[in-house]
Image: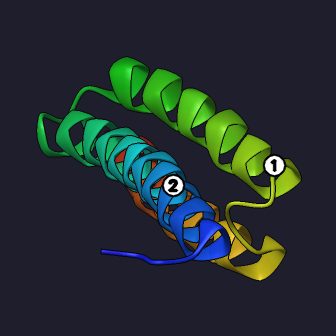
Amino acid sequence: MANHKSAEKRIRQTEKRTQRNRYYRTRLKNITRAVREAIASNDTAKANEAFKIANKEIHSFVSKGILKKNTAARKVSRLNSLVKKLNTSA
């Protein structure tokens, strides 16, 4: 256990930050999974809608400082290519 006030505060901060990071990491996985499941079910309307939500959410994570700009661009680009492939084949 921590012996100093500053160490106790650091423990509290780390715990809070861990919870916040876990929430965003889970949210990101769920968003991308929703798009991939819509693509797997060959439902173009559902895939387009899920991609629109994913695009907005991922870019909002950039503005909050959770993701870097290029990371978000890469994730959105990969999802977009999958959705486009589904739209052209349908």
User: What amino acid does circle 1 point to?
Assistant: Lys
Q: Considering the numbered disc 2 on the image, is that residue within a helix, a strand or a loop?
A: helix
Instruction: Measuring from the top left, give residue 1's x and y in whole percent.
Output: 29, 74
- Indicate which disc residue 5 carries: none
Picture residue at 64% right of the left edge, 49% below the top? 58
Picture residue at 40% right of the left edge, 41% below the top? 27
Residue furthest to the right in view is: 63
Instruction: Measuring from the top left, give residue 75's x and y in whole percent.
Output: 55, 68
Q: Kindly report which numbered mark, 2 or 1, lies closer to the viewer in this rendering.
A: 2
Query: Which residue in the structure is indicated by mark 1?
Result: 64
User: What amino acid does circle 2 point to?
Assistant: Arg
Picture residue at 68% right of the left edge, 67% below the top? 67
Instruction: Measuring from the top left, give residue 73's x and y in whole percent.
Output: 72, 70
On the picture, is 86 further left or further right than 20?
A: left
Q: Quadrant of residue 31?
A: top left
For the C terminus, the quadrant is top left
* Upstream in sequence: badge 2 or badge 1: 2
3 in relation to 87, above or below? below
On the picture, is 30 further left or further right than 63?
A: left
Query: Which residue in the structure is indicated by mark 2?
Result: 12
Specify few, some or many for label 2: CA neighbours under 10 Å numbering under 14, 14-19, or 20 or more: few
Q: Are marks 2 and 1 in contact (CB under 8 Å)?
A: no
Picture residue at 44% right of the left edge, 42% below the top? 87
67 in relation to 64, above or below? below
Task: Using the image as rendered, state which of residue 42 and residue 51 is in the foreground.
Answer: 51
Number of marks in the rendered image: 2
87 in relation to 15, above or below? above
Residue furthest to the left in view is: 41
